[in-house]
């Protein structure tokens, strides 16, 4: 099958497939005389595995490690367990950060109950204040929440 069909079968955009090839997650395919890459069921399986890992918010480096174990089925999977435990820890930390962010946003929302002119909007006025030094996440700013998953998973 050609790359477009591989994309349709796995629900993966063609550009993402090419990206995974550039990153070494999928082997670059030999080309036909017509310069088309040809893929088979093993590529569907590997790409599906990658997509499943990515749907669990695993970083490309984590996927790379898991693929190494998948490619060496006789290896002990203790490091796979360790990797997953670490990933669970990252997810739990992000959940805590997101809950703190939610509390902060709810607190900010409480600053303006009624629609009024923007000059007297409690939300806009609070956002205009410099961040409080030494404030907890409750009243301060939560850094890294938006950048956490996106930075770890840049590039699809």
Image (cartoon, rainbow, N blue to C red):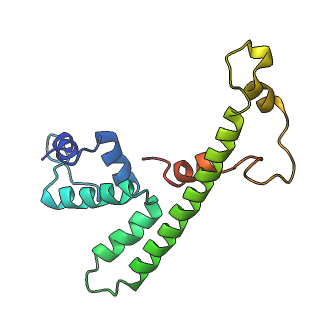
Q: Quadrant of residue 46?
A: bottom left
For residue 55, above or below residue 63: above
Residue located 36% across and 54% down the image = 55
Percent coordinates x, y for residue 142 in the rendering? 69, 49
12 left or right, relative to 20: left
Percent coordinates x, y for residue 138 in the rendering? 73, 50
Percent coordinates x, y for residue 147 in the rendering? 60, 48
Percent coordinates x, y for residue 100 in the rendering? 65, 52
For residue 55, above or below residue 111: below
Q: Nearer the viewer, residue 61 or 148?
A: 148
Q: Quadrant of residue 68?
A: bottom left
Residue located 34% across and 87% down the image = 76
Residue located 53% across and 52% down the image = 149
Tell me how many marks there are: 0
1 left or right, relative to 148: left
Residue located 26% across and 56% down the image = 47
What is the residue that sits farthest to the top in this orientation? 117
Q: Nearer the viewer, residue 89 or 107?
A: 107
For residue 53, above or below residue 86: above
What is the residue that sits farthest to the front in this orientation? 113
147 left or right, relative to 60: right
For residue 138, above or below residue 75: above
């Amino acid at each position: 099958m050609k790359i477009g069909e591989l994309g349709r079968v796995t629900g993966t955009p063609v550009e993402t497939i090419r990206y995974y090839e550039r990153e070494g997650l999928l082997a670059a395919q030999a080309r036909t005389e017509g310069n088309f890459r040809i893929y088979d069921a093993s590529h569907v399986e590997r790409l599906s595995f990658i997509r499943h890992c990515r749907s669990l918010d695993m970083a490309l480096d984590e996927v790379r490690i898991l693929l190494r174990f998948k490619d060496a089925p006789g290896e002990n999977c203790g490091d796979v367990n360790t990797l997953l435990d670490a990933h669970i820890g990252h997810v739990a930390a992000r959940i805590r950060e997101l809950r703190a962010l939610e509390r902060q946003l709810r607190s900010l929302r409480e600053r303006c109950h009624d629609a009024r002119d923007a000059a007297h909007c409690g939300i806009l006025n609070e956002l205009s204040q410099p961040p409080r030094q030494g404030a907890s996440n409750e009243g301060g700013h939560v850094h890294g929440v938006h950048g956490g998953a996106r930075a770890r998973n840049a590039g699809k």
